Image: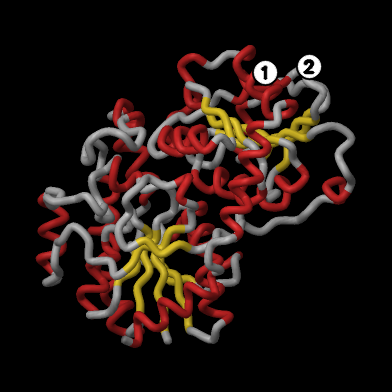
Amino acid sequence: MRVLFLPLAIPSHAFLMTPLAWAFRSAGHDVRVASQRRVLPAITQAGLPAVEVGGDSDFQSEAVGFLRQRPQQLHHADGRGAPGAGPTEPWIRTAEACAADLVALGEAWLPDLVVADSMVYAGPLLAEVLKVPFVRFSWGPDWPKTGLGMGGRHVDDHEPVRWPQRLLELYRRYGARAEQDTAAVTIDPFPAALQIPGLAGRLSVRPVPYNGSGTVPGWLAEPPRRPRICVTWGTNTTVYMGDRGFLVPTILDGLAGLNAEIVLALSQGDRDRLGELPAGARVVSGLPLDQLLPTCSAMVSQGGAAGLITAAVLGVPQIAVPMMADQPTNARLLAESGAGIALQPDRLDAAAVRAAAQQLLTGSGPRAAAERLSREIEQLPAPSAVVDRLTALARA
């Protein structure tokens, strides 16, 4: 069987799909991963065959240009409000840029199944053109629905979301249905405690932490002498928000003086923003979180979905300081699960960080909740079991 994966052109989105793609390959199926140029190295470094689509178009450049002109739209949703308030323009432009290449690839390769990121709007279009099952992949709490008013259907939906006219026209151009949800199922690698309730057609899969490839340093094999705290800020927040989105210095001020070792896992751009490091802190580059976090007692982050689920799988309690987009939703669900603490960025100071960190290091509540969440995740179906379900779907 041939399976075509379509991640959004951001490495963390491709990483979340990688275990399922490899489960298909391990079961003997033929897999290809199609996306824009920026993310191809992340795909091939995972040992998966990549196909470039979209030419010179680049989702991240589109989104940065669009959102920097409309900064208020970075903060529009926490998963509670009415859907459709958020920006859809960058995703629509990406769909327009990639549709022709995707259709050409599909008609030449003839996949039996299309598995697309919930933010790849050309995914349902391609499956419709090819007349094959469409599988929606939810890369985190279903913010594309609650924040953008797009993507999957929820069980209590009665009226279809009004699609933007340009997206309707794109679908009509290829003779595809523009419906609220054409997905046969929605693959969800997040446990119920970290998911917005009511996701229809939900097929759970156990998340397997994968945050890219890298070399594991020797010091990581040695037991830490003090509690180790990982501080990470993802790869996208400061790309979209610039310096105002970089709160790591305040976080470091709060962690200074604690009896803890601080390891900062940062992008090169964020490393360049750092000033002087406190004693006992080190910066690492290219070290995947799934290798670092098993040695950590806590994690502090901006609340990105990939880091959040990695820590959840490993039972590491977290502090989330949500800055934009899906991060407020992620942080809220994390706090409601008890496995972490959400701090508001507009009120963040060193004292708040220190108090939250001390609670994670010395209190029993967050650690017990994080361990309980990890055990719940262990009970979810393995990727291999989901492959069996999807294979049966494609052959039905």
Q: Is residue 74 left or right of residue 365?
A: left
Q: Quadrant of the C terminus?
A: bottom left
Residue 306: give x, y in percent of width and height: 53, 48
Amino acid type of disc 2?
A: Gly
Q: Residues within 10 Å of mark 1 (few under 14, many from 20)?
A: some
Q: Quadrant of residue 270?
A: top right
Which one is nearer the viewer's eye here, 204 or 248? 204
Q: Is residue 142 left or right of residue 124?
A: right
Residue 296: give x, y in percent of width and height: 74, 40
Q: Quadrant of the N terminus?
A: bottom left
Cα separation, mark 1 vs mark 2, equals 9 Å
Mark 1 or mark 2, whichever is nearer to me: 1
* Rendered view: 91 above or below 379: above
User: Do the residues bearing badges 1 and 2 touch, measured as CB atoms within 8 Å?
Assistant: yes
Q: Which residue is mark 1?
A: 354
* Rendered view: 17 above or below 352: below
Q: Residues within 10 Å of mark 2 (few under 14, many from 20)?
A: few
Q: Is residue 50 left or right of residue 108?
A: right
Q: Which residue is mark 2?
A: 257
Query: Residue 154 bears which disc, if any?
Result: none
* Rendered view: 233 above or below 286: above
| Residue plotted at (41% across, 64% down) | 203
| Residue plotted at (23% across, 40% down) | 83
Which one is nearer the viewer's eye here, 112 or 82? 82
Q: Is residue 205 left or right of residue 133?
A: right
Amino acid type of disc 1?
A: Arg
Residue 358 in sight from this viewpoint: yes
